[in-house]
Amino acid sequence: MKSTLAAIVLAATSFTAMAQNTPVGLWRNVDDKTGEAKAEIRIGETSGALIGRIEKSLKKDAKPDAICDECSDDRKGKPITGLDIIRGGKKAEGKDVWEGGKILDPENGKEYRASFTPIDGGKKLEVRGYLGPFWRTQTWNRIP
């Protein structure tokens, strides 16, 4: 009986650890230039592809009724809170990286190709945005 219980506990903790090594969850993004927390972003997965939206703006000057003036697609004029900023991105075979997605910077309305890599046991997420051969990486922190 004790060995069965131990096996169940071990399996449950292993599953929890594996489940954390994914971009799915709630994240705090931090400006890589200023170190200031900018937003809380919830990433989910639908049909194997990522979707991420801003749950809460954390910027000091954030207006609760702010809209995406700079967006040029279907997100133009939509509220920043609840705005889809991540679309697509699927897990690469044999790797802990989600590729092929896009990420929107609502401050300038530009959309970039993106990849998402959980690091530090899933406690952090490397978010890399690409524009041609250039890229910029931010490290987001998981919110428990």
Image (spheres, rainbow, N blue to C red):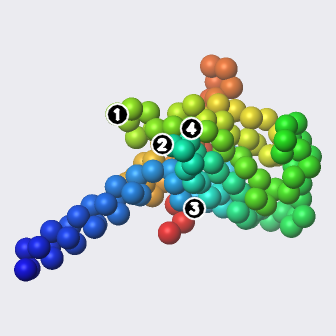
CA gap, disc 2 and disc 1: 13 Å
**Residue at the location (67% across, 20% down)?**
132
The vertical placement of 5 against 89, above or below, is below
Residue 22 appearing in the image: yes
Which secondary structure, mark 3? strand
Residue found 82% across the figure and 56% down from its top: 80
Measured in 3D between alpha carbons, the distance from the residue under mark 1 to the one under mark 3, in whole angstroms, is 24 Å
Q: Which residue lies under the disc numbered 1?
A: 94
Quick one: SS at disc 2?
strand
Residue at x 57% of width, y 61% of height: 26
Q: Secondary structure at mark 4?
A: loop
Residue at x-position 34% and y-position 33%: 94
Decide: is 67 above or below 90. Answer: below
Is residue 30 among the parts visible in the rendering? no
Residue labelled with disc 3: 26
Residue under label 2 = 117
Choose the circle earlier in sequence order: 4 or 1.
Answer: 4
Q: Mark 4 sits on what residue?
A: 89
